[in-house]
């Protein structure tokens, strides 16, 4: 039985993704993203599942930066999960939003619900937690006129009630999760419909000179390789030093990618393949119920 780690505790969206992706494995929760990735790197667990990007708040920079700077773990799969953020409160709370004194949640969840907090709970102090599941656990433990932002599973797990459903600012709220693995032995996953395959790479420019990024993109363009994402991140070596994360909408092959790599190396760039992997769409509990009604 393989060990699967995730950003916990129970009741997080990562916890949902893990159970949608894997069956008949041992699941271990970790308090932070670095702790989960370190556990994979050290061989304490076989695979780790961590959030990668949200449609509202963008890239989870902690995940990307840790994969680049601290561990050497390839991405072996990606899962897209619809996110439903709810306002969770103790059962003793009377339902008057004006009485909410504090709202606990992960910084990304808070940002996804900014308008709701601003207009409905403007007097509430925002307290950040390491995950939405941890926020629900804290609210259950503290009690009183406080609330958490999280999913229905977290409410059930920690004995809270859902006071307001779907409080996120935009309806098309999804999070991409990365499955990372150190070993080469495939870990058995559930039978899911594969949406597409992609390859994620990082590219570091030799120096900040005019037209450098254009030349990098041209290496993909004339080969008609579609890029679904390109984002710069600081190298952490000095101001103005960046690397680029690029998602290519096709699996790694033995012709086009080696050609791109050779062309970029000739320009003095450094290219690293972070993973070539299948992508899956997952369903929330509510969407599953809707399809079976």
Image: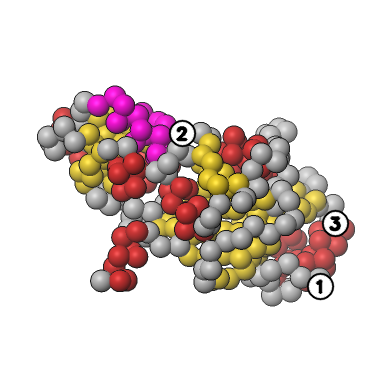
Mark 1 or mark 3: which comes first in sequence?
1
Query: What whole-number distance in Å separates the C-alpha atoms at marks 1 and 3?
Result: 16 Å
Residue 119: horizontal and vertical position, in percent? Answer: 21, 41
On the picture, is 53 further left or further right than 174?
A: right
- Report which quarter residue 218 is drawn in: bottom right
What residue does disc 1 label?
Answer: 255
Residue drawn at x 46%, y 33% as measured from the top left: 130
Figure disc tally: 3
Residue 212 sits above or below residue 88 on the image: below
Dot 3 and dot 2 residues touching (CB under 8 Å): no
Residue 181: horizontal and vertical position, in percent? Answer: 67, 50
Residue 26: horizontal and vertical position, in percent? Answer: 55, 47
Does the magenta segment cover residue 162?
A: no
Query: What whole-number distance in Å separates the C-alpha atoms at marks 3 and 2?
Result: 39 Å
Q: Nearer the viewer, residue 108 or 148?
A: 148
Q: Secondary structure at mark 1?
A: loop
Does the magenta segment cover residue 134?
A: yes
Task: Characterize the local packing of mark 3: few (<14), some (14-19) or many (20 or more) Cα atoms within 10 angstroms.
Answer: some
Viewer can see residue 176: no
* 1 vs 3, front mark: 1
- Determine which of the numbered discs, if any, sits on residue 130 in the image: 2
Q: Which residues are magenta?
A: 124-143
Residue 50: horizontal and vertical position, in percent? Answer: 55, 46
Locate the C terminus and report the quarter of the image it occupies.
bottom left
Task: Characterize the local packing of mark 2: few (<14), some (14-19) or many (20 or more) Cα atoms within 10 angstroms.
Answer: some
Mark 3 or mark 2: which comes first in sequence?
2
* 3 vs 2, front mark: 2
* 1 vs 2, front mark: 2
What residue does disc 3 label?
Answer: 265
Query: What whole-number distance in Å separates the C-alpha atoms at marks 1 and 2?
Result: 43 Å
On the picture, is 293 further left or further right than 22?
A: left
Task: Characterize the local packing of mark 1: few (<14), some (14-19) or many (20 or more) Cα atoms within 10 angstroms.
Answer: few
């Amino acid at each position: 039985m393989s060990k699967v780690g995730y950003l916990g505790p129970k009741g997080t969206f990562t916890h949902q993704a893990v159970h949608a992706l894997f069956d008949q494995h041992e699941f271990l929760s970790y308090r932070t993203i670095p702790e989960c990735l370190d556990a994979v790197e050290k061989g304490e667990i076989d695979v780790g599942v961590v959030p990668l990007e949200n449609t509202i708040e963008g890239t989870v920079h902690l995940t990307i930066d840790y994969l680049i700077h601290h561990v050497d773990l390839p991405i072996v799969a990606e899962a897209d999960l619809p996110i439903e953020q709810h306002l969770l409160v103790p059962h003793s709370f009377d339902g008057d939003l004006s009485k909410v004194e504090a709202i606990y949640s992960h910084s990304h969840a808070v940002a996804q619900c900014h308008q709701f907090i601003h207009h409905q709970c403007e007097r509430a102090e925002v307290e950040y937690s390491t995950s939405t599941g941890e926020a629900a656990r804290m609210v259950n433990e503290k009690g009183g006129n406080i609330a958490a932002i999280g999913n229905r599973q977290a409410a059930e797990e920690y004995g809270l009630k859902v006071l307001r459903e779907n409080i996120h600012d935009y309806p098309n709220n999804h999070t991409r999760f990365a499955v990372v693995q150190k070993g080469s032995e495939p870990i058995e996953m559930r039978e899911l419909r594969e949406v597409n395959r992609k390859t994620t790479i990082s590219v570091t420019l030799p120096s900040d000179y005019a037209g450098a990024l254009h030349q990098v993109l041209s290496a993909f363009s004339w080969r008609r390789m579609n890029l679904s994402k390109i984002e710069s991140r600081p190298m952490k070596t000095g101001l103005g030093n960046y690397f680029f994360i690029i998602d290519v909408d096709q699996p790694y092959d033995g012709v086009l990618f080696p050609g791109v790599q050779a062309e970029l190396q000739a320009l003095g760039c450094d290219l690293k393949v972070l993973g070539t992997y299948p992508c899956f769409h997952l369903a929330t509990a509510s969407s599953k119920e809707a399809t079976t009604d």
